Image (tube, grey):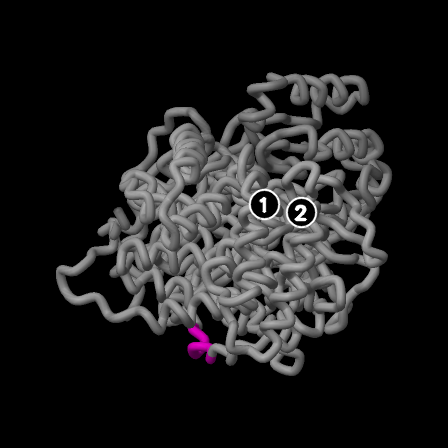
Amino acid sequence: MRVRRIAVLGNHTPRQCGIATFTEDLAQALADNRPDVDVVVAAMNDGRAYAYPARVQFTIEQDDFAAYEAAADDLNACGIDVLSVQHEFGIFSGPAGSYLLTLLRRVRAPIVTTLHTVLERFTPEQLAVVEELALLSAKIIVMSERAVRFLVAQGVPREKVAFIHHGVHVTEADREAEKARLGLPGRTLILTFGLLSPNKGIETAIRALPGLVRDFPEITYLVLGATHPNVRAHQGEAYREELVRLAAELGVAAHVRLDDKFVDRDELTRCLAAADIYLIPYPKQEQITSGTLAYAVANGKVVVSTPFWHAEELLADGRGVLVPFHEATAFGSALCRLLSNPHRRAEMEKRALAFGEQMRWPEVARAYAGLFEAARQVRPRFLPPARLPALTLDHVAAMVDGTGMFQHAVLAVPNLSEGYTTDDNARALHLAVLADQDPHAPAIVRRTLSFLHHALNPATGCFRNFMAYDRRWLDEHGGENAQARAVRALVAAAHRLDGALGRTARELLRRSWPALEGLGYPRAQALALIALAERAENETADPAWKALADRYAGNLLRIFGETATPVWSWFEDHLSYSNAKLPHGLIAYGRVFGHRQAVATGLAALRWLEGQQTAPNGGFQPIGSERPYRAGEARPLWDGQPIEVYATVSAALEAHRATGDVAWLAGARRALEWLLGRNANEMSLYDAETQGCRDGLERGGMNENQGAESTLALWLSAAEYNRAAQLSVPRVAGEASHDAIRLKV
């Protein structure tokens, strides 16, 4: 199906900036290229009121976070076939303009993003935004070959990047007639245009004039453009006044004209037609795109410029002259040589005009339209379903010695120097209980029960966590998560093991129950709720358990109510690690203890988290562990951890138990398959040779170490999923809806 409706997102005139002009021109060129296509604009607002033309059908206040999601819904509702984004970091709010990503994640149409700024080295915040832009966009458009190289060097896939020139309008107006119109008949006109600001280097050009006007007294240097609105708002006209004073001090005031006006496209091209030489004295190299330069070249002007990135590319092969930064004398010399050689100027104009053919808006619009059609045809790539490996404890057993399970690995062997943790031994006990048919299970159960017995500090009733290889405890009181995780593993062991091992587990559980009290951290409280719910399912509930569960669930409900917003439906102002444990705890508590609000809140939060952890192709994409993720920021895409998979699988299976909805079972499988190769790098973290699991997915590869947490996360996910899948039967019509709640009362 061909593209029928295009939305262009960016600033738009009458807002005064280069992006606004570009957005207007692109939208018009696309409409001219395909009259049967409806082109609409979503304009970014900066808090001011603008009289937009009819084509601007949506506006987004750049500082209003909620407005980005609302705009996405509006764009979806109007049935666009493609969204063309004009990206400049400064026109969107959030760290490095990251609020835009909130909109793009929600838009259903294919996205093609034009980057108007590309740096050789983005800041970490900028790179995070660019990486997610590349993930969400079918194509990234840049306006120079150098920009292509910069993006690829910083990890953007080459196949995602397309090079299309900055579009321009051209004119056939007569030079001398236009000079006369400007009140400059018979003068030699040197022109600079664009919004005026201190980063344009105009003072360097003025300093080049004294020597030049002695030889060419008919020169006028016209600086055409209003002061940039942001500069005017903060500094007034100080820079323009400084330039006027400088020209007077140098004795060239009669040769300098500063026209303070924002010119439309028609006026701009006519002024260009009048110019003999176009001057760009930018003071810095780091400009990857210049619309003013593109206009000058495409209109066949002789250009003298500093060697900023875009100028080096467009003025190659004799299409212009480059002079060093801040060198007024060099500018003067270059201008003098050109003015003394009309033949050279004519040849340069000819080369520029020929090169500029490909930069005219009709050609540029055709290139954009071609990319839009291609993006429309591309369907997200879905990898075939991964085959779940048979559950085995081979690598787990290899990570266990006479003391317990080692915390970390060097590739596939234990890293002895990192010692042991109660956390990992508790996980290993839980897994061995679930995988009781594996030949390694009995030995692992004995060893991990022994470790937890030794970890339980009789003086405090709580577990120590970190043990060195020489069996010295490195702490006297482990963290809260370790307490809750150890008790949860003992609950599973106490209810599933028979004989002497079962009695041992029950005795340890009895002695360690105080470790579950006094927890203050939300994830630890959620783990405790899971343990309390599982125990209550298998024993007559002690009133003290119910009171403790009520307290922890009440706290989770409280913090959710205080923190959650319509666009951030979560317990905290960030996502970090093992996120799904928080809703899991509430769902388990509500299902077992008969609390409907807890189940409903947990399900709502888990559905929201599922949306946050969904890749553009619909697959699972965990929040990476590079940094915490907050509302409005770029998502951490890398250092995804297997622990996030296990937390998600386990929570989704609890949601399935609570509702009977097989969609949650499918969600658990989707997360589990991320470990098996359905991820951004299409790499399996599961190692079929060792039966272990690698520690994380990184940019372009993996962390090859196969430590305890990652391997246990894989096999706990597989064990719990297999059990749930065997017990599940398809839901019959009317039995349970997605939001129905099955409570054990």
Residue on which the image places disc 2? 456
Residue 250: tell me if it is visible. Answer: yes
Q: Earlier in the sequence, mark 1 or mark 2?
A: 2
Residue shown at the point (82%, 37%) measured from the top left: 326
Residue 376 against residue 248 in the figure, above or below: below
Q: Is residue 168 magenta?
A: no
**Numbered mark located on residue 512 in the image:** 1
Q: How many marks?
A: 2
Secondary structure under tag 2 reads strand
Residue shown at the point (66%, 17%) measured from the top left: 238
**Image quadrant where residue 707 sits:** bottom right
Q: Position of residue 91 (x, y in %)?
A: 51, 37
Residue shown at the point (26%, 46%) measured from the top left: 745
Residue 226 against residue 679 in the figure, above or below: above
Residue shown at the point (46%, 29%) measured from the top left: 46
Please indicate whether residue 45 sits to the left or right of residue 643 in the image.
left
